Amino acid sequence: MYSDDEGREEYLFKIVVIGDSAVGKSNLLSRYARNEFSANSKATIGVEFQTQSMDIDGKEVKAQIWDTAGQERFRAVTSAYYRGAVGALVVYDISRRMTFESVGRWLDELKSESPFFT
C-alpha cells in the first residue's frame, strides 16, 4: 500500500499468468487489459506485463499482470518473475489435453518458486 500525490491510498498487486506455450496467455491478458484479440499473435519472449487500474471503495487498486513465456527454454528466466507475486492464473488449451496435463507441473513450479503459494 502507498499513497498517490493526492494522498489517496493505492494498492499494487502482482499476478503471473503461466501455462504451456500457445495456450492463449497473451490473448487472455490482451483481452482483459485492452479489450483486443489477435488470432495471429506471436509467442512471448521472456515476459511482458500490463497494468490494469480500478477504483474500489475510493482506493486505486492496480493489478500488474505478468505474461510469461511458456516455452521450456525460457523456464530459467520466468522463475524470477514469480518473486513478489500474490496471485497466479494457470492457463491451458481445452482443445489440447497435453496442456491440461501440464497444469500440475506448473503448480509445482509455482509452489517451489514463490513462498506465497506454499
Image (cartoon, helix red, strand yellow):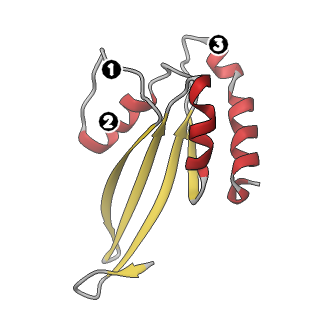
First along the sequence among labels 3 and 2: 2
Name the amino acid, label 3: Arg
User: Residue at image x 23%, y 84%?
Assistant: 5
Instruction: Estimate the x, y position of residue 62 in percent, counting from the top left.
Output: 37, 62
Question: How far is the residue under mark 2 from the one under mark 1?
Answer: 10 Å
Closer to viewer: mark 2 or mark 1: 1
**Residue at image mark 3:** 97
Q: In the image, 95: left or right of 62?
A: right
Q: In the image, 21: left or right of 118?
A: left
Closer to viewer: mark 3 or mark 2: 2
Label 3 with label 2: CB-CB less than 8 Å: no
| Crowd class of label 1 (few under 14; some 14 to 19; many from 20; radius 10 Å) | few
Q: In the image, 16: left or right of 33?
A: right
First along the sequence among labels 2 and 1: 2
Q: Is residue 39 above or below residue 9?
A: above
Numbered label attached to residue 41: 1
Label 2 with label 1: CB-CB less than 8 Å: yes
Name the amino acid, label 2: Ser
What secondary structure is found at the residue carrying circle 2? helix
User: Residue at image x 43%, y 49%?
Assistant: 65
First along the sequence among labels 1 and 3: 1
Question: How far is the residue under mark 3 from the one under mark 2?
Answer: 24 Å
Name the amino acid, label 1: Ser
User: Residue at image x 41%, y 22%?
Assistant: 43
Instruction: Estimate the x, y position of residue 109 in percent, counting from the top left.
Output: 72, 39
Q: Nearer the viewer, residue 94 or 16?
A: 16
Numbered label attached to residue 30: 2
